[in-house]
Amino acid sequence: MTTAQEYLDRRWTALILLCFAQFIVVLDGSIVNVALPSIGEALNFSESNLAWVVNAYVIAFGGFLLLGGRAADLLGRRRVFMAGLVVVGIASLAAGFATTQGQLIAARAAQGLGAAIVSPAALSIITTLFQDGSERNRALGVWGAVAGSAGAAGVLLGGILTDGLGWEWVLWVNVPVAAIALAFTPGLIGESRSESATRHYDAAGAVIITAGLSLLAYALLDASSSGWGSTKIVSLLALSAALIGAFVVIEQRSKAPLVPFRIFRLRTLTGANVVGILLGASLISMFYFISLYMQQVLGYSAIHAGLSYLPLAVTIIVAAGIGGQLVTRFGFKPILAAGMLSVSAGLLWFSQVSVGGGFLTDILGASLLAAIGFGFVTSTIAAVAGVEDREQGLASGLINTSQQIGGALGLAVLTTIATSRTDDVLASGGSTLPNALTEGFQSAFLGGAVIAALGFVATLVLIRSRDSRAHVEMANAEADQPESAGPEAAPGAIPDPSVS
């Protein structure tokens, strides 16, 4: 049987495994995009229904993240992580074998459920394996680099697999990956969970918040096609608000709440989640509109568009590594502020895209500036700093949920802005479709720049400088001491004696 010290010694290898799993989670959100035309032709999707191949994943992912994070704390982080990998693998296999629209959409929703289990469990394992300070900063820097580059890699890999093997393989690629991760997990990751928490599950709260978040994500994603003022969207948003309000009431009365609201007394955690919403709103939209601009205006093929993301992906990886070191030296607040400002500047640059533009003139510089900002964004470090080990899964689920809901909200709002501007230009006459599309994209990028700028302001106002400075002091104290030889250096890595 593997000892606690052996798990501790293997934590950097375990980090590779955990990042590998997160890479697949993020990849699944983008890899199907370039395969959509092939999927639509094979399964006779209408243009409107085809979007739900993506939306089903996003809705399930965003809706179940809080439940997945809390389950990791209470049931055991390794156990929940492995269960999520099983769900992802089986759902991916089923999705590739789908022969009808309903089967594929249901399987994609199951993939999203698996991702909502895997992602917060993996992040909470990292935050309990690595001490708060320079060591955790380095680990979360790697985590951020992998997550950031996966979105870009998904576009490229999706194009290669679709053109070379068929659309089914953008789904089946998860199966061997999940199997390999499952095989290595027991030997690399010890079981950990909240030993002090009551083993009680807030079933009513879990059902209501999952339904509320899922309805919210659905409404936001469907708003651009149904119309923000439509009865359908207004009703869905009202119902979602009512469910979330009911969840708040239930949690305040529950003896073992799914989300103990005392956690929001941590001002930096609350501020980091606000910034996470704004980050998700700006960056997910950026990836979406860059892809459309390259393919619909510049005429790039799927593979050409994917290759154009490589400089962005590499820059995110490098910047995330540097950002983690800068956080150890200067604290997470100034680095997070600099990151959001750089993202805003990159999107402002993108708002100058032109019909006759090209990769070097319209894409490369802006994407590198935004990528540096993304690599420097340390909202995850801020969101889990100072949180007790027993609630790391909850904190991880919260920051993931914030970014996912922010992404859905940003995409809905900015898509509406882009579509409205394009329609206005076409209605005025005398303009070609590429010109109209470009003006729509310009408006969307400008809107994204404003959202990222709000994230910069929120960082300055909501993130406590004292917490940021304390983080630096902790990292310096850690550097002055020799690495502990005992398992107490990573309390979350101590195996649960009740779990073999």
Image: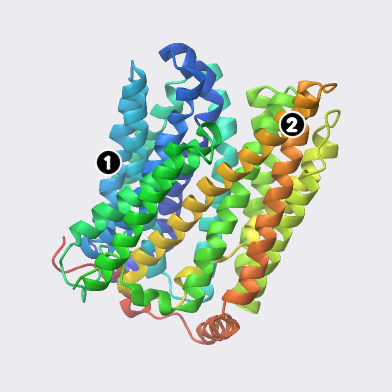
Q: Badge 1 local density, few (<14 within 10 Å), some, or many (20+)?
A: some
In-image side of 77 versus 396 (left or right): left
In-image side of 310 versus 183 (left or right): right
135 or 223: nearer the viewer: 223
155 or 261: nearer the viewer: 261
Residue at mark 2? 424
457 or 328: nearer the viewer: 457
Q: Badge 2 local density, few (<14 within 10 Å), some, or many (20+)?
A: some
Q: Could you tell me the amino acid type at mark 2? A: Asp
Note whether residue 57 is visible. yes
Q: Position of residue 322 (x, y in %)?
A: 66, 64
Q: Secondary structure at mark 2?
A: helix
Q: Secondary structure at mark 1?
A: helix
447 or 360: nearer the viewer: 447
Q: Position of residue 273 (x, y in %)?
A: 50, 65
Which residue lies at the image location 33% right of the left edge and 59% below the top edge? 69
Which residue lies at the image location 66% right of the left edge and 47% below the top edge? 314
Residue at mark 1? 86
Q: If you read the primary sequence from the N terminus, does the residue marked by circle 2 or circle 1 appear first?
A: 1
